[in-house]
Image: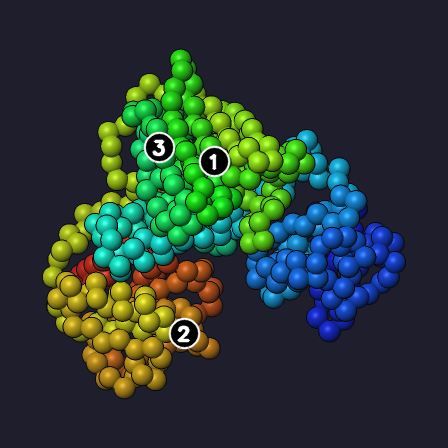
Amino acid sequence: MCESLGLPLLEEAGSEGVRLNATAGEMLGAARYASLSAALRPLAGERSAASLELAVRRARAGEPSELVLAEGTRALFVPHGAGRACVVLAPALTLAADDAALQRRALATDRSARVSHELANALGAIAGWARLAKEGARVDEALDLIEKSAETAWSAARTVLGEVSGQAAQASDPSVIDLSAFVDEAARLLIPKALKKKVTVRTSITPGLCVAGDRSSAWAIVWNLATNAVEALPTGGMLTLQLTATGPLVHLCVTDNGPGMSEEVSARVFEPYFTTKRSGTGLGLAMVKQAVGELGGTVLLESAHGKGTRFQVDLPRAAHAETPRRRVSSAKRSSGVFLAEHLDGRFLVLDDDAALRDMIATALQMRGAQVVVASTLNEALQDKGPFKLALVDLLLGDQRGDTAIARLRAAGSVKAAVLVTGTDVPRRLTPGGEPDAVLRKPFELQELFERVAEVLGRERAEQTAAG
């Protein structure tokens, strides 16, 4: 995309240093530089070398960011293969906010960055509430909100894994959404972060206000505006979340008494990857603008230096809400499997991820199974079995799970096996290592028991037919 637009492009090329396209060479006066930060120093202006290095490190780690350099030149730092980064340079107007087509393309080309943003928010809420629970504070509320945040992370991970495997992401069904409940939930999820910064969060929520559309879009609006405000506030600041309605519109107002923004910053806050934070991604408010558009609404920003910031989102009001229910990912499926069915016999769980291994083992043990756990194939082979079923992770250090299954079958310790994976199953599997079922990560316990019941049921059917 950058080449076709004729923009200056700098890319890390291993031992070759930094490679520049012709446009960048003309702009920077050289064909090669030892590092990206060295190449950008002539344009850095007031930016320090540390700021440049931080942006480069983030891009190498897979996190895009942007810096504004001298004379309005914008440097977009993006991932460029494993552990490398590249930089696209653009004059102030080249990627202007009014270039809608280019903005849409820029946002669409990095869905993984947006999913990472959602995951980071969800995991941040989980970590914050877990800390409060460990301190003995509001334990029941903490467990409830940890579960809800985990569902958000689960859904986001499903999205990015679907894109990695080439499967179309499942769109959430349009529905009537209780926005009042969303605002209240967001305020509660913010409590750990707000307590840490001694920020006061106040709410004024008219109950039962609803909008129609995609649930993830509605949540993106509420959560990103609220978390952005808390992060921007100084210690002791105040955030107000207000939800009201007039006629056919619902009004969400997010107001803080923080330092406010300059006109220059206010004009660009909705641009993808634009950020004034040292550790920001520049995606939160871009996601808000996109989500507001998807729900048929408008967003207005009012801010000035020393006078705080106010975002007002106006959305079409829906007539009524669905019957309140627990949020369930569209990827989950109901089945006739009785999840409390007793499991007898010995099971093997082979996974080098201790947390996942122990979770699977505990879930099986709660159904009565005798479980042997192992982190390596050699460790698993120490137990001769036989095992009724083996659950084997696809990536075991430097060895694949299908190879492990083949070895276990050859040793006579296992016959049936489930391959657990967060990626596509390779087309060419080790002979004898073909799984009886595949369990895709991340998964719910319901899916785990469904796969187990599916394989064991097939085994029983085959035994009955043979007898």
Label 1 packing within 10 angstroms: few (<14), some (14-19), many (20+): many
Residue 266 percent location from the top left of the image: 62, 34
Residue 267 as seen in the image, left or right of residue 366:
right
CA–CA distance in space, label 2 to label 3: 48 Å
Q: Is mark 3 on a helix, strand or loop?
A: strand
Camera-nearest label, 2 or 3: 3
Instruction: State the residue in front, 209 or 111.
Output: 209
Residue hosting label 2: 396
Residue 256, label in figure: 1
Instruction: State the residue in front, 89 or 413.
Output: 89
Residue type indicated by callout 1: Asp
Residue 206 percent location from the top left of the image: 32, 24
- Say whether disc 1 or disc 2 marks the residue closer to the N-terminus: 1
Visible residue check, residue 191: yes
Residue type indicated by callout 3: Thr
Query: Mark 2 touching mark 3, by CB under 8 A?
Result: no
CA–CA distance in space, label 3 to label 1: 12 Å
Residue 246 percent location from the top left of the image: 40, 15
Q: Is mark 1 on a helix, strand or loop?
A: strand
Residue 203, label in figure: 3
Asked which quadrant contains residue 362, the reply is bottom left
Residue 9 as seen in the image, left or right of residue 275:
right
Quarter holding the C terminus? bottom left
